[in-house]
Image (cartoon, grey):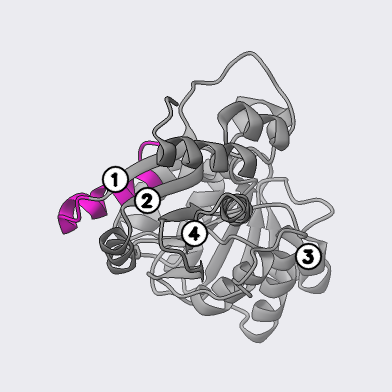
Amino acid sequence: MRATFANTLTEIARADRRVLLLTADLGYMALEPFSDALPDQFVNVGVAEQNMVGIATGLAEGGFLPFLYSIAPFAALRPYEFLRNGPILHRLPVRIVGVGAGFEYGTAGPSHHGIDDAAALRPHPGLLIVTPAEPGQLRSALLATWDHDGPVYYRIGKDERITVPGLNGRFRTGRAEIVREGRDLALVAMGALAAEACGAADLLAAQGLSATVAIVSTFNPSPVEDLAALARSHSLLVSVEAQYVNGALGSLVAETIAEAGAGTRLVRIGVRRPPQARSGSQTFYHALHGLGRDAIAARVLALMTGERI
């Protein structure tokens, strides 16, 4: 998604000189479409994420629309207090871009994994969080929210090839996008794991189970009404995310079911183990945590047939 981000933001910034792109010494072979085309609107602050947020807060106060680019944990967690006390509390239009959602920087080790960023930032109701599932949806989301009147956190992946069947780039703030209708259960997915959820739905269909697939791409506002409707119309909801199960999508779905009084069963598929002294690719980590389509389908089949899991 990095190329889509850089190209789309370049289009936006050409038309509005208030748009700036700041990076913490990252984005080589990714941000050049912007930096080459608009050098006066591009700043590399060096390896100084907290300072980058401070600079952006001042720029936003001065009327600019700064976008801050870094790896997800360095964008969301290292400068957390600066984000909270600056753009979030003061409702300033700072845009934080965290790349490498989930385990996309798998071989770099746990310090680079984006598996707790959404959970850390979701409690702030004034911060719009955008978690696109594919490059086409990222482009739609940027075009829809770049001039949002408060702060935004964009949680994006690296893969330009990923597609979610039936999504076709659709994006609506505060809504879930239904890409597949089914009667037996609903898979509720976030980010790049939306494609895995669709693959799991195909595997379940081969076993005679019909699954709805819903994509959640925003928090604050969150698609509460859509999730409540899914809970009322299905006996089982399964949340799927490359995050710790506590705090992000799974927690949102649980809270929605409880507050709606839906009484629907929920199973949360996500990261449940602490980091271990092992490193590997995104595929390795998905297998380790049961996040691939085969593992998702097997978990659902076990649930539906009453097997021990």
Can you identify the residue that label 1 sits on?
265
Nearest to N terminus: mark 3 or mark 4: 3
Can you identify the residue that label 3 sits on?
35
Quick check: is 246 in the magenta stretch? yes
**Which percent across, then down, holds residue 108?**
71, 29
Give the alpha-carbon distance from disc 1 to disc 2, as whole Å. 6 Å
What secondary structure is marked by label 1? strand
Q: Badges 1 and 2: C-beta atoms under 8 Å apart?
A: yes
Residue type at tag 2: Leu
Magenta stretch, residue numbers: 243-263
Indicate which disc residue 167 carries. Answer: none
What secondary structure is marked by label 4? loop
288 and 249: which is toward the camera: 288
Can you identify the residue that label 4 sits on?
210
**Which percent across, then down, holds residue 96?**
53, 56
* Point 32% across, 50% down: residue: 252
Quick check: is 168 in the magenta stretch? no
* Point 68% across, 41% down: residue: 104
Q: Is residue 166 left or right of residue 123?
A: right
Give the alpha-carbon distance from disc 3 to disc 1, as whole Å. 49 Å
Can you identify the residue that label 2 sits on?
237
Q: Decide: few, some or many residues near mark 4? Use Cα within 10 Å; few <14, some 14-19, many ≥20.
A: some
